């Protein structure tokens, strides 16, 4: 397998104001500034440990996600970013993203982010409707979201992403259109669209499948909302470059493109995943275990967290993630990566089986516009 010279760095901050009703991510409610500072110090120690393993790889994208990274004091976040720069080789044009909840942003934090080199902010808006936000269990309201976007731009961020969610029980098409119109009016450089996924172990799962308090959004309504968003964003000049993402030209997410393009990335923090040189591993998820490893000066990866996949399984991952991009993936690049002809691995008849849903565009295999609506069904065929 080929090894790219540049890697992405993901930094996980597993703390938030409170857990949203739909959230299945590794995160915990926390409002103690002392604990957040202690955690930032642990990240700094992990950065020093990880540097010893990959000292010469150039980092050209950093993504600080969570949880709610913007919950951390601005000076602590700046220390983490500066430590990365002091230890790793970070490119001059590195894209550095931080996720933020609108309720946690302040002018002071935004200045601290910009001063340490963070140049992209991803704001978890989800909706511009207070009824929907309350139902989701979000810690902000519509005005908080609008103010957070305007504050970020005024502070100097010229690369702002907002997350929007659709397919929410009780969300009408009018509510969805209104959120889209408000988003396009505010003109963020990037918009991420997510269909609500009901995950076991979340309050929403119990509300829908156990207590029967609400009903899941019908599939046809979910798809209608998705297609409405694509149409409105296209009319507004946004480039739909990945199933769930659209951007103004030149503002596509460099970091996320690494995940979809089979490129290397290193994860820091509890539960963070890594893919380096064809090898996959994951940090231990329990914060207490993570801290124990870090205090001992060891990488926080237990043997059972090292994932071994066959070459055939890796091929499936390559195709599955590559098809997420609207341009698809180049089958010549597939061959260079695995030293195997694509149609020796996957029978050519698969193009006929999914005719109208996938197509060859030159040497690129990609989903058609119709195929985007049944993407998981199509992509699963290759795994």
Image (cartoon, rainbow, N blue to C red):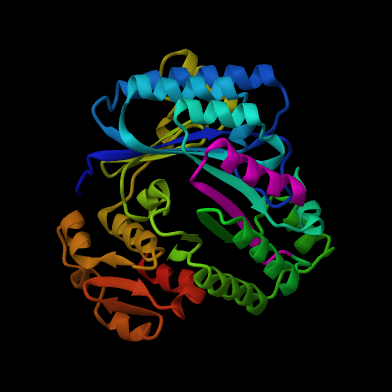
Instruction: State which region is magenta.
Output: 142-168
Q: Looking at the image, which residue is at 33% across and 61% down? A: 316
> On the rendered image, what quadrant is the C terminus found in?
bottom left
Magenta stretch holds residue 152: yes
Answer above or below: position of 135 versus 265.
below
Residue at x-position 71% and y-position 64% = 168
> Residue 351: horizontal and vertical position, in percent?
31, 81
Tell me the quarter of the picture where residue 102 sits.
top right
Could you say where residue 93 lies in the image, as x and y percent from the top left?
33, 37
Whether the magenta-drawn stretch holds residue 32 is answered as no
Q: Is residue 119 visible?
A: yes
Q: Is residue 238 left or right of residue 26?
A: left
* Residue at 31% across, 48% down: 263
Q: Quadrant of residue 61?
A: top left
On the image, which quarter does residue 7 sit in?
top left
Residue 71, given in percent of the width and then of the height, sits at 65, 31
Q: Where 250 sits versus 59, above or below? A: below
Q: Residue at x 23, y 68 (%)?
A: 345
Q: Where does residue 304 sit, x and y in percent of width and height?
A: 43, 36
């Amino acid at each position: 397998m080929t090894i790219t010279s540049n890697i992405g760095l993901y930094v996980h901050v597993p703390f938030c104001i409170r857990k949203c009703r739909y959230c299945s991510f590794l995160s915990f409610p926390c409002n103690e500034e002392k604990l957040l500072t202690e955690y930032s110090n642990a990240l700094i120690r992990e950065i020093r440990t990880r540097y010893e393993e990959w000292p010469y790889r150039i980092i050209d994208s950093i993504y600080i996600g969570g949880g709610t990274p913007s919950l951390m004091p601005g000076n602590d976040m700046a220390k983490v970013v500066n430590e990365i720069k002091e230890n790793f080789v970070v490119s001059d044009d590195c894209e550095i993203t931080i996720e933020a909840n609108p309720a946690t942003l302040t002018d002071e934090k935004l200045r601290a982010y910009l001063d340490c080199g963070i140049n992209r902010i991803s704001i978890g808006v989800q909706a511009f409707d207070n009824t929907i936000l309350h139902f989701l269990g979000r810690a902000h309201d519509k005005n908080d979201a609008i103010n957070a976007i305007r504050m970020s731009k005024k502070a100097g961020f010229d690369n702002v992403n907002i997350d929007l969610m659709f397919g929410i029980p009780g969300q009408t098409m009018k509510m969805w259109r209104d959120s889209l119109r408000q988003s396009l009016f505010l003109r963020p450089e990037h918009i991420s669209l997510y269909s609500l996924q009901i995950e076991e172990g979340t309050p929403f799962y119990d509300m829908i499948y156990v207590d029967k308090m609400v009903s899941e959004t019908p599939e046809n309504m979910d798809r209608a909302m998705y297609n409405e968003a694509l149409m409105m964003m296209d009319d507004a000049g946004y480039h739909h470059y990945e199933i769930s993402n659209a951007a103004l030209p030149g503002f596509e997410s460099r970091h996320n493109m690494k995940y979809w393009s089979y490129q290397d990335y290193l994860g820091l923090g509890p539960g963070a995943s890594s893919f380096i040189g064809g090898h996959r591993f994951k940090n231990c998820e329990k914060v207490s275990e993570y801290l124990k490893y870090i205090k001992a000066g060891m990488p926080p990866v237990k043997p059972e967290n090292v994932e071994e996949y066959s070459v055939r399984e890796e091929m499936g991952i390559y195709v599955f993630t590559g098809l997420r991009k609207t341009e698809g993936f180049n089958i010549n690049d597939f061959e260079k990566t695995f030293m195997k002809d694509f149609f020796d691995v996957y029978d050519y008849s698969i193009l006929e089986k999914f005719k109208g849903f996938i197509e060859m565009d030159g040497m690129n295999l990609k989903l058609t516009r119709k195929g985007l609506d049944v993407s998981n069904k199509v992509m699963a065929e290759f795994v």
